[in-house]
């Protein structure tokens, strides 16, 4: 039986890894949070709360970073994607420094962490941002477009001028089960020349074949190869779901992206939020309320993943 209530994690759970840029140990704890509070990062070392909201994005160059004053939290997109992918609305994400642990470069470790905590139903109906009119950002041949649909879906095309990553598309119709199986394990990727450049600038000190797919001019350097033939496009879908989470609630709409990245994804989110006619915020507490809204919530995976 489906449950349309908001959800949080069942208990406190932690993991430790390294920060991609610092190369230093970084730990993260997921903790339950009150209904309607959304997802909030907490810099425990500074005592500063950084809500996961689009207006607090301070950097989108290599990953999405949030900030309040001098308190930064970098590389938020994979843990945000995991929380959205498993239908978690409210969560405190406590960190002990400026970076979320990079782990294996995918969202799978965060999915395991949420599964370890369990997902708990709360006494408030779920809120959604329902897209009513198309909104898009175009830059040359790059596109990020959100349009009305009965569910959340993401279609992403990557096209790097590289023999291994040419015109690769992945389409995802939302389901918690599909998210955990088909998207969460897809790792981030980078080019060897970019890593060498970043390391020379003191960045990516923690970067290695353990936390990214690394590609040179012709081949994949990771001895284990790819987890999926289209792992690159899958990871871009994962990133887009994490970036869309900064709307502040799940989005009901179809995202089509071509050669987009964190910066364009965030530009799209800001444009949607700045265009009142493009969307409505609805609160749903029973299945009977769905029909007039023309929302196909079973597609959100709520019925299949309960606490
Ligand atoms: Zn990513």
Image (cartoon, rainbow, N blue to C red):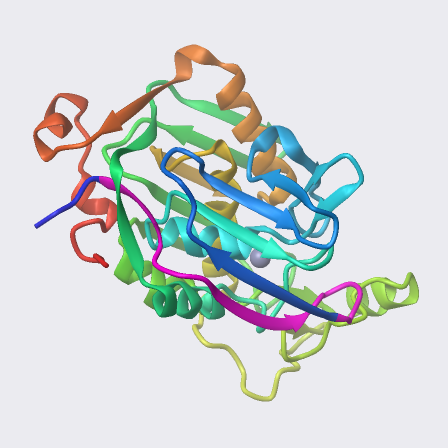
Identity of the residue drawn at 73% across and 45% down: 72
Please tell me in which quarter of the rendered image ligand 1 is found.
bottom right
Q: Who is closer to the viewer here, 286 or 197? A: 286
Picture coordinates of residue 136, whole percent (x, y): 50, 26
Identity of the residue drawn at 73% across and 54% down: 45
Above or below 6: residue 27: below
Picture coordinates of residue 243, whole percent (x, y): 53, 43
Look at the image and tell me whether residue 287 can be seen.
Answer: yes
Look at the image and tell me whether residue 141 can be seen.
Answer: no
Q: Is residue 112 left or right of residue 106?
A: left
Identity of the residue drawn at 32% across and 31% down: 127
Magenta residues, as a range? Answer: 5-24
Q: Is residue 20 magenta?
A: yes
Q: Who is closer to the viewer here, 101 or 139? A: 101
Pick out the residue farthest to the front.
Answer: 47
Q: Quadrant of the C terminus?
A: bottom left
Q: Is residue 8 magenta?
A: yes
Picture coordinates of residue 264, whole percent (x, y): 61, 36
Identity of the residue drawn at 91% across and 61% down: 201
Q: Quadrant of residue 57?
A: top right
Picture coordinates of residue 49, whole percent (x, y): 63, 41
């Amino acid at each position: 039986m489906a449950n349309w209530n908001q959800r949080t994690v069942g208990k406190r759970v932690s993991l430790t890894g390294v920060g991609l840029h610092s190369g230093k140990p970084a730990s993260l704890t997921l903790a339950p949070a009150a209904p309607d509070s959304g997802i909030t990062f907490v810099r425990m070392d500074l005592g500063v709360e950084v809500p996961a909201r689009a207006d607090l994005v301070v950097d989108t160059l290599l990953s999405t970073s949030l900030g309040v004053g001098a308190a930064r939290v970098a590389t938020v997109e994979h843990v945000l994607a995991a929380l959205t992918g498993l239908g978690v609305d409210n969560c405190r994400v406590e960190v002990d420094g400026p970076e979320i642990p990079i782990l294996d470069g995918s969202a799978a470790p965060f999915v395991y962490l949420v599964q370890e905590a369990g997902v708990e139903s709360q006494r408030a109906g779920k809120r959604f941002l329902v897209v009513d009119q198309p909104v898009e950002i175009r830059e040359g041949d790059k596109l990020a477009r959100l349009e009305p649909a009965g569910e959340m879906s993401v279609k992403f095309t990557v096209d790097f001028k590289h023999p291994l990553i040419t015109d690769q598309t992945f389409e995802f119709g939302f389901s918690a089960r599909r998210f955990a199986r088909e998207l969460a394990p897809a790792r981030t990727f980078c080019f060897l020349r970019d890593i060498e450049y970043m390391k020379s600038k003191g960045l990516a000190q923690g970067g290695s074949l353990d936390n990214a797919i690394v590609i040179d001019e012709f081949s994949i350097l990771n001895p284990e190869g790819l987890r999926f033939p289209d792992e690159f496009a899958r990871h871009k879908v994962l990133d887009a779901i994490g970036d869309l989470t900064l709307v502040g609630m799940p989005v009901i709409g179809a995202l089509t992206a071509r050669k987009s990245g964190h910066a364009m994804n965030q530009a799209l989110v800001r444009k949607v939020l700045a265009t009142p006619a493009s969307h409505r915020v609805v609160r749903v507490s029973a299945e009977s309320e769905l029909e007039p809204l023309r929302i196909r919530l079973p597609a959100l995976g709520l019925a299949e993943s309960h606490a």
